[in-house]
Image (cartoon, rainbow, N blue to C red):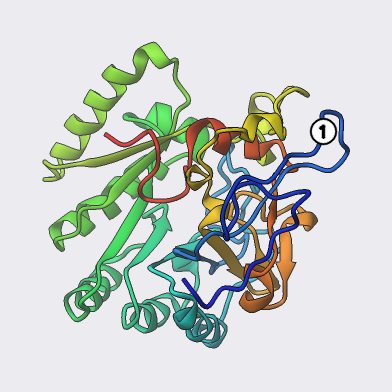
Amino acid sequence: MKDLNILPSASTAVNGLGGGRVAALPRGAESPPQVPLRALDQLWFQVSGTVCNLRCRHCFISCSPDNHSFWFMTRGQVAAALAESVPLGVKEYYFTGGEPFMNHEMCGILEDTLELGPATVLTNATLLPERTVRELARLAAGSPYSLELRVSLDGVTPEMNDAIRGDGTFARCMEGVGRLVDAGFLPIITAMQSWPEAETGRILGGFRELLADVGYDRARLKIIPPLLIGEEARRTQGYAPSMRVTHEMLHGFDLDQLLCTRARLVTAAGVHVCPILLDYPGARLGDTLGEAVARPASLSEQACYTCYLHGSICANTAASGEF
């Protein structure tokens, strides 16, 4: 990506563009580690802000019908960022929220995006009537690029899922998944691991049986770890004080495992490091994409520790968790 002219500070960046390892700050230094953007492979859009039709008890940015901290993006705002992204070499686009299909321009936004590259929408699948699914199928059929739907489902039974996502959401989500499968999509079913590790094999088998019942015999499953911020911190517990990324931890670490070295998040109110850190003022990098790609990402928040351990959990492909 030759267009990016990123010159990380020698005192704070590790393994940045331009060559060898840069010395980390000494132990006890006040400044957190920073990492430069190596390539803008992914561009994320907070397309519905923090507005969601659900009020999930594990949401790391506390999205809800009445959380208006970040508002919807317009089709024009997204189109401007898409145009800015082309010379930066973006390879794929992601749309998240909130619930993206609360944005009444979502299908138009996808139409614009699919002219440029692959697109993924992260959705709870409860707002996917037949007419919307038909339009999504039309858009997918008319583009040379792939359209992926990532569907959040947090259990293999109504009791398991609805305890986290709200009463009735299991049935509504499964209806949406069934419509997507009938239309030819292979949605990526994504669940936060809320069960003991020893139960993972049984849970995965339960997901496959559940999805086979709606005709999805080649189910794609993605299990992600909890992010102990927002509602999840209130539901269970937050991070322990020691759970932070340090300079020493980055010695010999593959920085490509971190989403913030390969992506940025566009919102209606500026450009941020990543979707996880939306609520943190320090993660806002600028008003425009051009400003944001020139600034490194600070690993100052405790949620960065989860990405350090598990890799780019937000992306469709990550170091672990795919089955």
Pick the residue in front: 313 or 63: 313
Could you say where residue 304 lies in the image, as x and y percent from the top left?
64, 40
Against 310, residue 107 (above or below) is below
Pick the residue in front: 1 or 194: 1
Pick the residue in front: 31 or 197: 31
Against 83, residue 62 (above or below) is above
- Please, which residue is most extreme toward the front here? 20
Residue 273's image quarter? bottom right
Could you say where residue 244 lies in the image, as x and y percent from the top left?
71, 31
Residue 142's image quarter? bottom left
Give the structural element (helix, strand or loop) at label 1: loop
Q: Is 25 left, or right, of 133 in this rendering?
A: right
- Please, which residue is most extreme toward the top here? 198
Quadrant where the C terminus sits is top left
Residue under circle 1? 26
Q: Is residue 308 visible?
A: yes
Could you say where residue 231 lies in the image, as x and y percent from the top left?
66, 38
